[in-house]
Amino acid sequence: MKIDRLIGILSILLQKEMTTAPELAEHFEVSRRTINRDIEALSNAGIPIQTIQGSGGGISIMSGYRMDRTILSSKDMQMILAGLRSLDSVSGSKYYGQLMEKIQMGSSGFVSGRDSILIDLSSWYRETLAPKIELIQDAIELNKRLKFYYYSPKGETEREIEPYYLIFKWSSWYVYGFCLLRREFRTFKLNRMDKLIHGEPFVRRQDVPMPNLESDEIYPVTGTVKAVFDSSTKWRLIEDYGANSFTELPDGRLLFEHEYADDENLISWILTFANQVTVIEPKQIRETLYQITSEITKKYEK
């Protein structure tokens, strides 16, 4: 991709006194003509690049611009490489790993120390998730619609969308686009999508709204739950909601109070604690839990 190559060329020029078009062409596996066009694009973008012909010549950033070479510190480069490495954890093509190697080669004397941040965005669904991510990326770049079956608590539907953003949020991947069925912009969770294929090309809409990723927007608060947990569950409460989500009672049990978005997710979470929790409020949650556990008991009585 051109933008990635331009970033790579700029990185090399920022770290080396001089390089040549043949060296860059070999490094990025493109023709010298392509490199010349890239250098022209960087110059048009305001980067003061100079080229010197003949023996001992080459491509470099003008000396007067040298102080700007420190715009990226060693720590900055480490953060960039950590980000690329994290993207590669969900990429089936290893593209980001190859881009990372190119940047490292151009900055080998600049990036010091060992990797201190390791980010893995993959999941238990990596084998099925990576192809979806790659297919969605291609659809966004090529302006092609996406067709898929979508599974939600309300049932199964066949959808077709114009994709605009691929999002990683709440430890999951989502695609944001204009849904032709609902005639509005929607966010879809990749793990709930099946039989995903490219559709017809589309013309990008003007003034596409940015996806609102605030939790209160996606999961609006509907109530507050109050429950008492056994002391052995403290690690779970801290992991899920933080150390300030409960108060320790004199007998060691934990009084938990927290806002929640919908009954279904709250009940599912409560049930994972089995008999180590007693819900105090709200009343409808207590009644639903009683009904569910009674039905479970009936199933296993025989």
Image: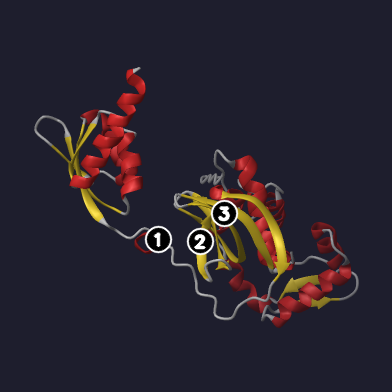
Residue contact between numbered discs 1 and 2, judged by CB atoms under 8 Å: yes
Name the residue rendered at 22%, 52% in the picture: 224
Residue 184 visible? The answer is yes
Image quadrant for the C terminus?
A: top left
- The residue indicated by pointer 3 is 83
Q: Nearer the viewer, residue 173 or 5?
A: 173
Q: Amino acid at mark 2?
A: Thr
Name the residue rendered at 69%, 72% in the picture: 202
Q: How many marks?
A: 3
Residue 103 visible? The answer is no
Label disc, if present, on residue 292 of the rendered structure? none
Name the residue rendered at 56%, 66% in the picture: 181
Compare marks 2 and 3 and give the one earlier in the sequence. 3
Packing grade of label 1 (10 A; few <14, some 14-19, many >=20) is few
Q: From mark 1 to mark 2, how far is it between C-alphas?
A: 9 Å
Name the residue rendered at 72%, 55% in the picture: 102
The answer to whether 230 is drawn above or below residue 61 in the figure is above
Label disc, if present, on residue 218 of the rendered structure? 1
Q: Amino acid at mark 1?
A: Ile
Q: Nearer the viewer, residue 6 or 280?
A: 280
The answer to whether 250 is drawn above or below residue 281 in the figure is above
- The residue indicated by pointer 2 is 187
Where residue 37 sits in the image (x, y, percent)?
81, 75
Image quadrant for the N terminus?
A: bottom right
